[in-house]
Image (cartoon, helix red, strand yellow):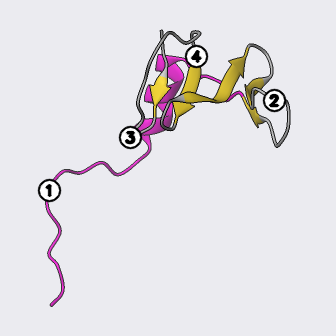
Amino acid sequence: RNVVVAAGSVVRGTFADHDIIAGVPARVVRRREPGVGWVRPDGTGDVIPESPTIAPEDLHAALDGLDLDPTPHPTTP
């Protein structure tokens, strides 16, 4: 579930949920650790922290103030 596969990867076998895999053959390059974020499987490098989520009603409220007019605007030559 929710595995991201990089373009051109050759996938053989199975992978854990929430892995990011890449390469030929494909191997894990990042893994999601709940409450921590995205980490490398060997524990080196930076951790990409989890992003907070937003409730749908809060998203609608935030979008209400934006100019989302779909009419095309004239372009300048």
Residue on which disc 1 sits: 71
Give me the disc on residue 54.
none
In space, the residues marked 3 and 1 are separated at their CA atoms by 36 Å
- SS at circle 1: loop
**Left or right, 2 with reference to 28:** left
For the residues bearing labels 2 and 3, Cβ distance under 8 angstroms: no
Give me the disc on residue 18.
4
Residue on which disc 2 sits: 42
In space, the residues marked 1 and 4 are separated at their CA atoms by 40 Å
Type of amino acid under label 3: Ala
Residue at image position (55%, 12%) is 15
Type of amino acid under label 4: His
In space, the residues marked 3 and 4 are separated at their CA atoms by 17 Å
- SS at circle 3: loop
For marks 3 and 1 on the same chain, the one whose residue lies earlier in the sequence: 3
In space, the residues marked 2 and 3 are separated at their CA atoms by 22 Å
Is residue 43 part of the magenta span, yes or no?
A: no
Residue on which disc 3 sits: 7
Type of amino acid under label 1: Thr
Range shown magenta: 50-77
Q: Nearer the viewer, mark 3 or mark 1?
A: 3
For marks 3 and 4 on the same chain, the one whose residue lies earlier in the sequence: 3
